[in-house]
Structure formats: structure tokens, C-alpha cells
Image: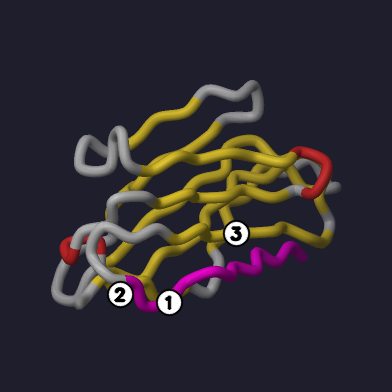
Amino acid sequence: QVQLVESGGGLVQPGGSLRLSCAASGSIFRINTMGWYRQAPGKARELVGAATGDGNTNYADSVKGRFTISRDITKNAVYLQMNSLKPEDTAVYYCNADITVTTRLNVGYWGQGTQVTVSS
């Protein structure tokens, strides 16, 4: 079994910053892609951004230039630095990881979600 544990959400004013963290633990052979999705009330879950194992990143157009994804391979962790936050960034943010487990199967995992609210 693999668990993804997120932290770092909260309430922030427009223009502020937050940093989300996600750490994976369990029967991990290799972590491939790690990333972040978000889901606002009444909307579908959408990709925010992702980072591959070799360091390539991609972002949704709505967050380019404001959000940065980074990984710490030694800690099996991924981070989302969010700057210049806007009210429309309000959502539950989910960590996602594509992991090769110790049985050599590739499995996708989700974190429990963390609420980010941008409001004055």
C-alpha cells in the first residue's frame, strides 16, 4: 500500500502565497510523475501541474507564471508553490502520483485533498 499525505492548505488573501506539500510512503519502488489537481465547487477536477521523474514540468495555462512545482526525490515529496493567488484559485487541491510499487506494477494514487481558499 502507498499513502499520499498532503499539507499546507488554508485561507489567504488575494495576491498572497501558499505552499502545498505532499509526501508518499509505503511500498514504493519508483515514483514516476507527481503532480497536483484541483476541484472547485460544482466543477470538474482539473490538472494544475505535474513533474516527471526526470524533472520536466507542465502547468495549466491558468497558473503558468504563478505556480511552481518541485520535487524532492529523497523524500518522495512534491511541492506546489502558489504565488499571486486569485479568488478563482479557491478549490480542494489533490496530490497525485504515478508509482511503480514493489511488485513492479504502475498504480495511480491520490491524496486526501487540502482546501485552499483565496478571499479577502
- Considering the whole magenta stretch, tell me its main secondary structure: strand
CB-based contact (under 8 Å), mark 1 and mark 3 = no
The residue to which callout 2 is attached is: 117
CB-based contact (under 8 Å), mark 3 and mark 2 = no
| Image position of 2 with respect to 119: above or below | above
Residue at horizontal 54 percent and vertical 62 percent from the top: 110
The residue to which callout 1 is attached is: 10
| Image position of 32 with respect to 6: above or below | above
Residue at horizontal 23 percent and vertical 64 percent from the top: 14
Q: Amino acid at mark 1?
A: Gly
* Count of numbered tags: 3
- Please tell me which of labels 1 and 3 falls first in the chain: 1
Instruction: Please state the horizontal and vertical placement of residue 117, each as a whole percent of the image.
Output: 30, 75
- Please tell me which of labels 1 and 2 falls first in the chain: 1
Alpha carbons under labels 3 and 2: distance apart:
16 Å
Q: Is residue 40 magenta?
A: no
Q: Amino acid at mark 2?
A: Thr
What's drawn in magenta, residue-wise? 1-12
Alpha carbons under labels 1 and 2: distance apart:
6 Å
| Image position of 5 with respect to 58: above or below | below
Instruction: Please state the horizontal and vertical placement of residue 78, each as a whole percent of the image.
Output: 62, 48
Q: Amino acid at mark 3?
A: Ser
- Residue 86 lies left or right of residue 102; in this view the side is left
The residue to which callout 3 is attached is: 21
Instruction: Please state the horizontal and vertical placement of residue 85, each as a whole percent of the image.
Output: 28, 57
Mark 1, Cα crowd under 10 Å, few <14 / some 14-19 / many 20+, is some
CB-based contact (under 8 Å), mark 1 and mark 2 = yes
In the rendering, which numbered label is found on residue 115?
none
- Please tell me which of labels 3 and 2 falls first in the chain: 3
